[in-house]
Image: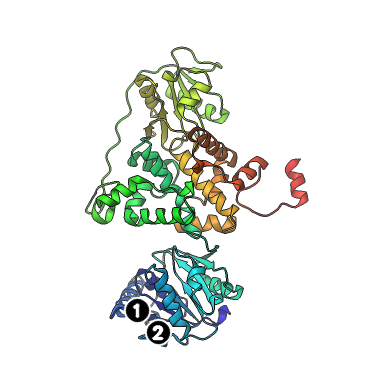
Amino acid sequence: MSDSINIIGIVGTGAMGRGIAQVAAEAGLRVKLHDNREGAVDEARRFIGALWARGVEKQRFDQAYAETLEKRLEEALELDDMSDCDLVIEAIAEQIKAKQQLFRQLETVISSRTILATNTSSLSVSEVASACDYPERVIGFHFFNPVPLMKIVEVIPGLRTSPAVVEATEALGQRFGHFTARTTDTPGFLVNHAGRAFGTEALRILDEGVADPMTIDRLLTDQGGFRMGAFALFDLIGLDVSHAVMESVYHQYYQEPRFRPSVLTRQRVSAGLLGRKNGEGFYRYQQGQRQVSEESAAPQVSPMPVWISGEDTEARRLLGDLVEAAGWPLERGDTPSETALCLLTPYGEDATDSALRQHLDPARCVAIDMLAGLDTRRCLMSNPATRLDIRDAAHALLAADGTPVSTIEDSGGFVLQRVVACIVNVGADIAQQQIAEPATIDRAVELGLGYPKGPLAMGEHYGARRILTILENMQTATGDPRYRPSPWLRRRAHLGLSLTTSSVQSPSTMEHHHA
C-alpha cells in the first residue's frame, strides 16, 4: 500500500502545512495544496520556493532540481481537486468540529483507498475518525515545527484504524526521512506526554521558593546537559501556549497529579507576560535577547575542617579529593568534630531531614547534589538552621577550583534530582501504559524535545535505584502523589533490570543475571 502513495493532498498551508509540503515534494511526491484563504497557497509556494532557491545558492542542489521540486507543488482550488490523492493530510485549526467536517467533505470526493491523516497535536484521532463513514482509513500523522528540521513524526492509529493504513503511513514518514514514532491515541500522544515533567517540576521548585528561574535554568543546562532551561523554554514557546497545553493534558488525564499545572504561569498569562514574543515572561528581552544577570563571586573565607557523610561512598571519595585539592583539612572519622563543616549527599531528601536522621548539628550542615558528579556546575543546599559562615565556607570550598556553584534553599531532591526523577517517572509510566515501546519513547523524546537522553535512557544513566530512591523520599516527605513511582520503574529497579527494554529475558540470560 505504501508504494501506491504518489500523490498527497495537504489542506491548510500555515507553518505545518508548508513544512509537510516541502518534505513531501523532496521525497518525490506530487503535492496538492488547498487553503480556504485566498492567496494562501501562492504564499506557501513562494515561501517553500525561496527555501529551495537558498539551497541552490548554497550549492546543496542545482537550479534544474529546484525547478523540478517546484513543479511538484500544485494548487487544489477546490476539495474536489483532491480526488486522485492517495493520502490527504489536514493541517487546519486545532478544533475537533472543523477537522470532522473537513474529513466528511473529503469522503465524498476521494477514492475508497485514500488515507485521511490528521496532523493534530492534542485531539483524539478516534474522535476525529468517529464522524467518518470509513474510520478505518483515518490516522494521526503528527509532525513537529519546523517539519524539515524536526526529523520525527508520530504515527497514531485510532481505535478503528486498519493495520494496512498504519503500515502505509509509517512507510511514508520514513520516505520523508523522519523517525516514525508509533504511539497510541492517548492525550498528548508520546512526545507532549513525555514532556510534561520538565516544566511542571521546574515550576514547583520555583513555587516553593527553592531557587529563582535563572538558577534553576543554569542547573538544568550545566548539570543536566539540557539544551535549554525550563523557563527559557517557556518563554520561547510562549506562556499562553505552554500553559494551555499543561491545562489540556492535566484535564484530559482527569487531574493526574504528575501533570498538575502551576498558578505561576496562569498569573503571567493573565498579566500578558507571555515570553520572548512580547518582551517579558520569566525573563526580560531586549532586541530579542534574554537578559541574564552576572553570577556573584564566591565568598572569600579561611579553610576550616571538613567532614563528609559516608552514606554514599563514591560521593564521599569525590568530595574528599576536592577537599584535599583545595588544601582544606579533611576529617576521616565516623562523626565530625564540633568545628567541622559537614557535607551531606542526600537523594530526594532535604538537608534538614538528612542532618537530623544522621544525628548531626543542622547549623553546620550543607548538602551537595552528587547526582551528576562534580565535573560541571555544583549545587549547594543549606537548611533553615545552617549558619551563614558555614554556607559561605561550603560555597568557597566548592568554587575553589573555578567551577561555578549555585546555592539554593532546602528542598528534597535539589533541582536536577527532582526534574530528572520526574522525567524518568513519566517515561516509565508511558512504557507501563504501553503507549509506545521503550526504544521509541527514548528516540522520540531526543528528537522531539531535544533532551540529552530519552527518559528511560536517562534513568539508566543515573541509575534506576537512585531515581526510585529520590521519588520515594520525595513522596514520603511531601505526601504528594505526583512523586509516586511508576510500577515499571519500581519493579525494574528492584529486579536490577534495564529500563530501556521491555523484552522478557531468555532463561539462559536470567541464569547469568542471578549467577
| Front position in the image: 322 or 423 | 423
Q: At which x and y percent is residue 458?
A: 53, 47
Q: In the image, is 481 to the left or to the right of 489?
A: left
- The N terminus appears in which quarter of the rendering? bottom right
Q: In the image, is 485 to the left or to the right of 448?
A: right
- The C terminus appears in which quarter of the rendering? top right
Q: In the image, is 268 to the left or to the right of 396?
A: left
Q: At which x and y percent is residue 18?
A: 37, 73
Q: Amino acid at mark 1?
A: Asp
**Which numbered disc, 1 or 2, marks the residue that appears first in the sequence?**
1
- Tell me the SS state at disc 2: helix
Colour scheme in use: rainbow
- Decide: few, some or many residues near mark 1? Use Cα within 10 Å; few <14, some 14-19, many ≥20: many
| Front position in the image: 28 or 117 | 117
Q: At which x and y percent is residue 416?
A: 45, 40
**Residue 304: mark in rendering:** none
Q: Residue at x 63, y 47 (%)?
A: 498
Against 304, is 513 above or below? below
- Farthest top residue in view: 338
- Tell me the SS state at disc 1: loop
Residue highlighted by disc 1: 35
**Residue 79: mark in rendering:** 2
